[in-house]
Amino acid sequence: MARIFREEITQHRGRLLVALTCMSVVAATTAGTAYMLDPAIKKIFLEPDPTALFVIPLVVIALSLTKALATYVQAIAMSTIGQSVVSNLQRRLSMSLLRADLAWLDKRHSGGLLSSLVNDTQHVQDATAQVMTALVRDGLTMIFLVGVMFYQDWELAAIGVFVVLPGAQVVQKMAKKTRKASHATFEETGTLASLAADALKGIREVRAYGQEDHEIKRIGHSIDRRLGHIMAAIRAKTLSGPVAEALSGVGIATAIIYAGWRGMEGDLGLNNFVSFLGAMMMAYQPMRSLANSMTRLHEGAAAADRVFSIIDTKPGILNPKNPQLLAHPAKGSVVFEHVSFSYDGTHDALRDLSLHIPAASIAALVGPSGSGKSTMMNLIPRFYDAIQGRVLIDGLDVRALSLEELRGQISIVSQDPFLFDDTVAANIAYGRNDATNQEIEDAARHAAAHEFIMDLHGGYEARVGEAGSRLSGGQKQRVAIARAMLKNAPILLLDEATSALDNESERLVQHALEKLMKGRTTIMIAHRLSTIAHADMIFVMQEGELAEQGRHEELLAAGGLYARLHAKGLSEAGV
Ligand SMILES: Nc1ncnc2c1ncn2[C@@H]1O[C@H](COP(=O)(O)OP(=O)(O)OP(=O)(O)O)[C@@H](O)[C@H]1O
Ligand SMILES: [Mg+2]
């Protein structure tokens, strides 16, 4: 929470000053009203004075009006600060998420991260705005009111304060409990969001396997657990108010007894006593609010912990300090030098992999499922960094290039390309915001996508739906190919389409890919014998290592793993 103050709130110094001033005014006018009971009783009842009958009510009215105005201004100023803290945290959070390493994101569920973005930041705001207001306004009000109490009679005041003290401890304890329960609530909110997101994303599987009840039950359990944590927090939170209330009752009763005794002795004036009592009763409200805000502070702190744990993760894959430059246009040769990689630090996904792919050639990666083909591709655009060895493009280590330049040289078309819920045109132009309509259409024609796009309702302006759900698999793939055409990068990474496509669209996609590959360094994970046979070189992977390499005929003749895979029929072997 201290960080929120240091990093976020100090940016609003002017507003904060206004708010603080208004809070002091509120505190002073509240105490002033309590004090006014003293002259009111003295000048009207004890020593009647006709002018006081007009002046005192006028002063009281003026005080309340001033208080009302100050309360309003302070509330607006604090809300503005609180809301801009939220939006700023959301901005920082989304920036961290978009820049985070894939390795970091792999370990988290997007639902939980979204929940932090939307939910946790909101709790931070609630805490900052309310806690600051409570601490300053109610704290000051308390101090002023206690001041009035001491001014009227210090012995009485000392008793009143003394009685209330143990309450502070209870409140402190409850605040800690709130923090724990809130933290658990936020975690569970993330889990709930993840479960719901998964169930919706996988709704076809849910239906096909009749798992509606199972999913509803899972989500229901999460809702129950969340409710449990929330109730624990509420019980702890709510206790602080009544504790404060009960204590102030005891305080008031003690004061009355002591005051009554002293009043009977005749050394305490009625006016002093009424004003004292007024101040003490008025102090109850800010005291409760202070107690409340202690628990809120801890709730906000729990949320802030979660938010900052994301904001503070520094990506490991960064731009180098002095990036080297490729020739423009880059040629696009790709070399792996003794590259090893592991996702989890225990099991090697790639082991001492060395290979050389000359510029403008076509390389096919084959090998059993899980042998490291996709992993090898992931290292080229630095989605992950090699643990040992180097990946070079045109002789330069990919880690020596700026990420922008590196990724500018690479187009990727995956098996299941992702489309954004936007228009077809926007999806093709993704990464080339400056593309003209003509360029977009040309790319689509080259990708054999123009015809089907024209048949869509709205043509290029038709929306593709969430993750492109309104298009068929082959259509999505051709949009992705058009996107890669438009990017026109020298290196092409291809996770080749498989049997998901029917013959006609497979032929179209195949044709589009052949056009795309022309003149580029292409590295493809190949499944179809026809494409593999045409590759300039074939790399056969096995358990993260390069088992064989060569051309189709050479490898067949060698009679190794490739020949065995080939005998089994490459695509049936799940390659
Ligand atoms: N994000 C990840 N986190 C942890 N392990 C992973 C991750 N991605 C892949 N792996 C593991 O790394 C190994 C290599 O996986 P990779 O995806 O490179 O295989 P592949 O050759 O592409 O297989 P396929 O032909 O089935 O796509 C596998 O053992 C896999 O379980
Ligand atoms: Mg793969």
Image (tube, helix red, strand yellow):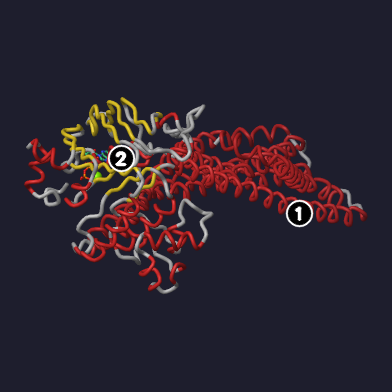
Please name the amino acid that badge 1 sits on: Leu
Whether residue 246 is visible: no
* Residue 254 relative to residue 305: left or right: right
Please name the amino acid that badge 2 sits on: Met
Q: Earlier in the sequence, mark 2 or mark 1?
A: 1
Q: Position of residue 494 (x, y in %)?
A: 30, 48
Reply above or below: 315 against 523: above
Q: Is mark 2 within 8 Å of ligand 1?
A: yes
Per the image, the residue denoted by label 1 is: 69
Q: Nearer the viewer, residue 97 or 149?
A: 97
Query: Which corner quadrant of the figure contains ligand 2?
Result: top left
Q: Nearer the viewer, residue 211 or 484?
A: 484
Nearer to us of marks 2 and 1 is: 2
The quarter of the displayed image where residue 164 is located? top right
Reply above or below: 435 against 2: below
SS of the residue at dot 1?
helix
Per the image, the residue denoted by label 2 is: 377
Q: Position of residue 226 (x, y in %)?
A: 36, 50
